[in-house]
Amino acid sequence: MTEQLAIQMKKITKVYPNGVMANKDVDFEVRKGEIHALMGENGAGKSTLVKMIFGMEQPTSGEIYVNGEHVHLTSPNVAISKGIGMVHQHFMLVPSLTVAENIVLGMVPTKSGVLIDFDKAIEITEEYSKRYNLVVDARAKVANIPVGMKQKVEILKALVRGAKILILDEPTAVLTTQETEELFKELVDLKNQGFTLIFISHKLNEIMEITDRMTILRGGKFMGVHETKDTNPEIISRLMVGRDVVLKVEKEPAQPTDAVLKVKNLEYVNVWGKKMLDNVSFTLRKGEILGIAGVEGNGQKELVDAIFNFIDVDSGEILLNGESILHTNQANLRKKGISLVPEDRMLFGIAAKASIKENILSDRSGDPKYNNGVLFNMKAIEDDTKQLIKDYLIRCKSPEQEVGMLSGGNIQKVVVAREFTNDPVLIIADQPTRGIDVGATEFIRKKLVELSRSGIAVLLVSADLNEVMELSDSLIVMCGGEIAAYFEDTTDLDDMEMGKYMLGLAKQDEEQIRKVRHE
Amino acid sequence: MNKKRALTFSITRTVAAIFIAILVATLLIFVSSKGNTVGAKFSETLVALRAMLIGPLFRNNGSFNTKGFLEILALMVPIMLTGLATTVMFSANQFNLGSEGGIMFGAFITALIAIYTPLPPVILPIVSILGGSFATMLLLMVPAVLKAKLGVSEMVNSLMINYIVMYIINFLLNTRFMDRTKGQVQTLNFQEHALLPQLVGRGTKLSLGLVIALVVVAIVATVMYRTRWGYNIRMIGQNEDFSKYSGINVPFYIILAQGLGGFLAGMGGSLEMLGRYTAYDWKSLPGYGWTGVTVAILAGNNPAYVPLAAFFMAYLDKGCEMMSTYSSVPAQLIDIIQAVIFLFFAADNFLAGYRQKLVIKSAEEDAKAANEVQVEGGK
């Protein structure tokens, strides 16, 4: 049996140096000559698993077999020598070089050992291109070719290096429908020529279309392996997004009043030409938590960026208390009372090398309370920081401690301590509890509910289904940049049904979706 | 890592870098020293090293070298200011290297004001200094504005500005402002009442400039750590995305930091002119700007440590001068020592293993402390 397996991973556990457990006792088997899907939500541990197959990460424990041979994949070079190739989600190509040059990079053919043999490079490229029916223009500069062709260059790169097992990390994420179809045809071709393909995706439809089998991961754990033909999207979506433990948050029913944030017909096409916001309209009222659910990458990030003026939308309106806030700089947005708990806390939420005190001060350094004319009132700053450390249960040695030295949960508490205490009228909480411990998670969730009940409008964006369903008073589901569903009441929501909207298997009718505008 | 360990680490690192630099210098002195036998070379090396390391403060007979000490203090003035300038700009993560041209520009503008403006005593030196400082502020804001508005690298621009400044000043000096009654290329003499009062005898050229420079150090340290402007400058240096998100006006502070840097560099030139010269005669870049970069790096971009770092650099400078007087080793050796110190400071991973050990030690202690707290809490 074993020799039929191209890849066999036994009891793989991976703990990153920062303490995050990305995989726990995962078994993963790929047969020779099949297209095998690896499925799961963001953060389910798919990328970590394939990175270990390609030698980019090493497992903390567990064993890996390639073609029946027990291997230690210590680097991508070792993996390549075992016949494994990987096409990364973000292309690893040199834009200023030609297609042929990219393909031979690192194994350049030479004339008499010195000069680069460009003709030979083109010859190699064209030979492989023909053999595997992957049409590329060998002489074109990579910067000038379309995305679909770049992907073929990546595949060729792996094939030229002798790959028999190909890993494709979300290959369709950047492709148009036509390009996707073309890619699928090519992948099936490769399979028929005896290649083994590992295909990562969270798009159900395409998985059903081309794969033979699929392995599902959730929260870093193995959720089973299935023959594609014996299964259906409902089963898979339940396995993918099903809820584990339900953390209950006590909350009284919301009594929303006036509209605080009005978003009207927002449209945004990103630099790769993909439509990320498609006619998004909703109204958020005082005293309610409006949740935005969805698989990541379906426009939630762009929506938050649009409100906080990190991107310029193509059309549409954003109103705060009736006043347009498009193209308003962040200082003024904050003056108007918008707070943001950013998705990427290390990049936007804090300055890691600065002290807790300095991190709290960042949005209020001009506050008259902290300035005696010219100089800072150091005592006031110190006292308030100490108070916040107490109120927000930030575990630290002193206000002077470097924020980067705290644990993830405590770093996030520093962020929310700042964002929740600048007299906001609107709090945008983008993945507020991602990757932090249970205690901090519970604390932040309770705070959010408390603040909303005190009359603040809260926009909660979260890929954590449990979190949005539990915290939100009403809920939007985003899929493909559109609002796919709106639920006025979240009490009796069924996560199966949610899953369908999240994965694009269903969409509510216009009338229901329009209700979120509260017009 | 706790504060004490962090301090231990930076002191160790500083001492190690300086030690290695002096070691390299010793090797070079040995190679370049005269003498036919190894023994002769060796004794020459000892003479040179003694002159370099001890000479500035102690004469050969062991008595204190007052003149040398005062000269070191005088030499500190320009490099303290370029050091401060660099500190402010580097704190904002702006690699503006224009303080070299800036100090020359400030010196030239101050000279012109001190020569040509009919102002009364006291007012004239003040106006001259501020004139030179503000003019240089505008000069260094050119790369800053280009960076803030168009995203052009401030490093390349500021470097090139140095040479533009130098050649324009040379052109003006040779054509319009040269004093043709003198044998050398220099301007007319400054008006007598423009000169800064000397603290001691005229010979050492130690002027009131030192006091002004120390006051400026205190002001800059206060601005950087006790006001919102300094805070915002440091925050954009730490994390620009975070600053923007927090509502800090990033382009404004990019420009402010470099403007402030320009002001300080220009002031360095002004104090140098009115404190130690009677007419302007710089025809090439003075090198104080480059030394300022080393000073800022030695001081860890903290204005409070700038005087210490400046003293060290001035000491080395004086030492190398003494060495070239008493031995056959050229004074330019200081550039090599500077370069070596610079190299080891710029290398993030220099002594990284030692730092890692300290970090682990701290982490273990923290974990232990946390356990103890829990135990106490459990009682």
Image (cartoon, coloured by chain):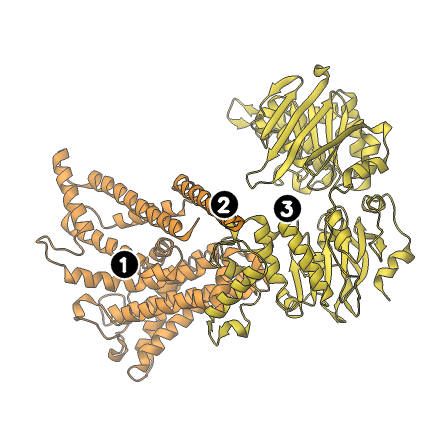
Chain colours: A yellow, B orange
Give, as a three-letter code, the residue at label 2: Asn
- Residue occupied by mark 3: A435
Percent of width and height locating residue A458 = 72, 61
Give, as a three-letter code, the residue at label 1: Phe
Label number found at residue B311: 1
Dot 1 or dot 2, earlier in sequence = 1
Q: Residue at x 55, y 48 (%)?
A: A407
Q: Secondary structure at mark 1?
A: helix
Mark in the foreground, 1 or 2: 2
Mark in the foreground, 1 or 3: 3
Q: Residue at x 68, y 61 (%)?
A: A308
- Residue occupied by mark 2: B371
Relative horizontal placement of residue A381, taking residue A455 as reference (left or right): left
Q: Are marks 1 and 2 on the same chain?
A: yes
Which picture quadrant has residue A102? top right
Mark 2–mark 3 distance (CA, rounded to whole Å): 23 Å
Relative horizontal placement of residue A317, taking residue B227 as reference (left or right): right
Percent of width and height locating residue A147 = 72, 40
Which picture quadrant has residue B249? bottom right
Label number found at residue A192: none
Percent of width and height locating residue B251 = 55, 63
Give, as a three-letter code, the residue at label 3: Gly
Relative horizontal placement of residue B191, taking residue A108 as reference (left or right): left
Q: Is residue A406 above or below residue A225?
A: below
Residue at mark 1: chain: B
Relative horizontal placement of residue B162, taking residue A102 as reference (left or right): left
Q: Nearer the viewer, residue B93 or B1?
A: B1
